[in-house]
Amino acid sequence: MADTRCGFIAIVGEPNAGKSTLINRLVGGKVSIVTPKAQTTRFNVRGVCAQEEAQMIFVDTPGIFAAGKRFEKAMVQAAWGGIGDADAVLMLIDARQGLRNTALQVMEKLKGAKKPVFLAINKIDAVKKAMLLELAQACNAQGVFERIFMISALKGDGVEDIKTALAGHMPHGPWLYPAEQMSDISLRLLAAEVTREKVFLLLEKELPYAAFVETEAWEEGKTSVNISQAITVQREGQKKIILGAKGDMIKRIGTSARRELETILGKRVHLELFVKVRAGWKDDIESYRLLGLEFRK
């Protein structure tokens, strides 16, 4: 019997460092949504990939930032929870942003992680080599990391090096997931996240963080899937923005989401979207439960 390894790796860092792009690249498919906006990931998403005899479960965590409101604090708490449960930690920083105070604070906390900690400097194609070298030296001087990788998550440069290196740090044990499985996120939740991504991309200026998407019905046949989703917002004015003139915007959101879901599911998708207004959804315990976040009074 093969000497298998299996373990969890938490991917952490500041918002918009490229964590979701990296995890999708690592697993070879879409498990986490990607937008240009910071703080898009709201809960821990697991992506699964194998490297020779090792199975690695990468946990895409919400960006770590100075949270003020309850919902934001729950997101950051989810990120630190992902670190506590992991066998190794991969921190990601944006080469263009450099070593900012928030990143330094994360590094300081990681010194007490009592597990292997690695660093990936992302978006290396966007800065000069001299700046990269200086940044890597400054990060190395923190005394936190076993190894530093230079990568472009978007292009895939350096990503295989991460997989090869981390595979050897996974504990011995049986695989937890079938070899072909890319994530443990449910299809209902993934579908909701795909639609929320389209809301972000199409309405990034008008409606950055007010929307919540829930898959309310899922009927699957041999060749098609019927999906019904509710987009919840906080105010009537936001509902009008999502609907658009004569329903034009919600049609665009639905068309974009449907096309991507058909690619993911390999089936024809019938997607029905409607909009709800719930003023306090960010303080509703049910919203936290659906996202797997901890509700703190």
Image (spheres, rainbow, N blue to C red):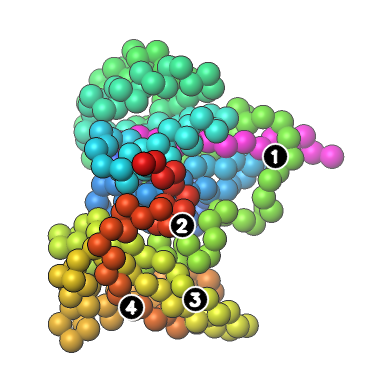
| Residue at the spot 33% in from the left edge and 78% down from the top edge | 274
Between marks 1 and 3 in the image, the one whose residue lies nearer the viewer: 3
Q: Secondary structure at mark 2?
A: helix
Residue 261 horizontal side relative to residue 128, left or right? right
In the image, which residues are magenta?
A: 1-14
Picture coordinates of residue 189 (x, y %)? Answer: 48, 62
Tell which of 205 and 229 is nearer to you. Answer: 229
The N terminus - image quarter: top right
What residue sits right under mark 1 in the picture? 53
Residue 274's disc is 4
Q: Nearer the viewer, residue 140 or 178?
A: 178
- Numbered badge on residue 290: 2
Q: Is residue 87 left or right of residue 72?
A: right
**Label 4 near label 2: C-beta < 8 Å?**
no
Amino acid, disc 3: Ala
Of discs 2 and 1, which sits in the foreground? 2
Give the residue at mark 3.
217
